[in-house]
Image: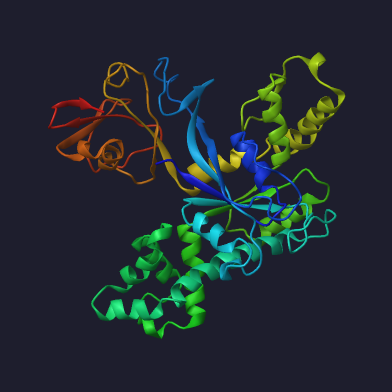
Amino acid sequence: MPIKIGIIGKTNTGKTTFFNSATLSSAEISTYPFTTKKPESATANAITLCVHPEFNVKDNPKNSRCIDGWRYIPIELIDLPGLIKDAWQGKGLGNQFLSVAAQSDALLHVVDISGGIDSSGKITEAGAGDPISDFADIEEELTMWYLKILEGNRDKVSKNIRSGIEKIVAIADLYRGIGVSNSHVKEALRVAEVEDNEFDDIGIRESKKFATVLRKISKPTIIVANKIDVDGAEKNFARLRERYNDTIVVPASADSELSLRRAEQKGLIKYSPGSEQFDIINPSELSQKQNSALEFITKEIMGEYMRTGVQFAINVTVFKLLKMNAIYPVADEEKLADKKGNILPDLILLKDGATVADLAKEIHTSLTKGLLYAKDIRYNLRLPTNYQLRDRDVISLVSASTSKKSH
């Protein structure tokens, strides 16, 4: 299952531009509220350094791509309709939005850091809006949605607890369909300081605190400070980072990334997503407008922020926020190949703390039966099934059913 990342935020913050630049889709972009009327989904990539140069082999990946030594790992990016106030009560496209946000592993919260939209998401002059309030408004909607689920089912939870179901399980059952686990609930009860309270004694204030924490734990979020290239955006960026110093904030110019990706598509420049530079292939083919745009990006974006921030935001979400490790399973430890001879064929993303047994399960459930151990190819080490895998491990699995390496 590919990782799913949802893009949230008010209308006109540049969510769809971000989505298009990351996926090279052509979803409609305009200044009308609710241009994105239904969730759009497309493939983007998380990018990490490939291990093939280290092992001095030429790889031919199957589930990902390797370009210039970088592995492009497919992930699903979902552009969600913009939220409005009271979306949690079903206003606007609230219910549709929230049901899709629920399926995401993590969220990218895009704000217009230039302050170019008003509180309702309509375009205004740069600096007139307040991106800090915009962020808080949407976060409140998500918290209220989590709170509504709990408060609307109090009787059900109480009844289940009385019938002998543990409090953590009874609460987690309410949120099961949106990717909330028992461990998420346990941690949220602890942080909200109500882990020892009887459920019926938890008041609305504690309940809201619990909902706030549970939403943050179960849907980890980074802030994408979009339109960073607009005059005056830096001040808002500094304010936002100071106000939300417990959240990762990535400066971005989705518009610049989209321009670079389109120019690269047309063969005008050589550019890799997330790169800190690009090369113009044939200057004579550029129009004056294209030249000016590329000069602006070189000076104002690459010069100031090193990158456009779009690919960086995705990489940070996958590898820092979700704490994913890139694991390379192989069947033939000599050739680093699968049974068909494909060298370093697969890259599997596993959560930090995942074990050899988890890897076997991810590849195929039948592999877990009779799994004996794994071999770390890099260090020629035998690893027990409960060994916690590390980023960039190259692993072959050994099972009793075959008494040989299998993948």
Q: Check the picture and name the quadrant holding the C terminus.
A: top left
Question: Does 223 sit above or below residue 392?
Answer: below
Q: Check the picture and name the quadrant holding the N terminus.
A: top left
Residue 268 placed where, x, y %?
72, 20
Residue 250 placed where, x, y %?
64, 47
Q: Residue furthest bottom?
A: 201
Q: Is residue 197 left or right of residue 135?
A: left
- Please report the residue visible at 27 percent of the width from the left and 81 percent of the height from the top: 162
Location of residue 246 (image quadrant):
bottom right
Q: How many marks?
A: 0
Q: Is residue 384 visible?
A: no
Question: Does 274 sit above or below residue 165?
Answer: above
State the residue in front, 15 or 223: 15
Residue 146 placed where, x, y %?
49, 68
Q: Is residue 290 visible?
A: yes
Q: Is residue 208 left or right of residue 330?
A: right
- Please report the residue visible at 68 percent of the width from the left and 55 percent of the height from the top: 34
What's the coloring here?
rainbow
Residue 401 placed where, x, y %?
12, 31
Q: Residue furthest front?
A: 37
Q: Is residue 375 left or right of residue 158?
A: left
Location of residue 312 (image quadrant):
top right
- Please report the residue visible at 66 percent of the width from the left and 63 percent of the height from the top: 84
Question: Does 233 sit above or below residue 48?
Answer: below
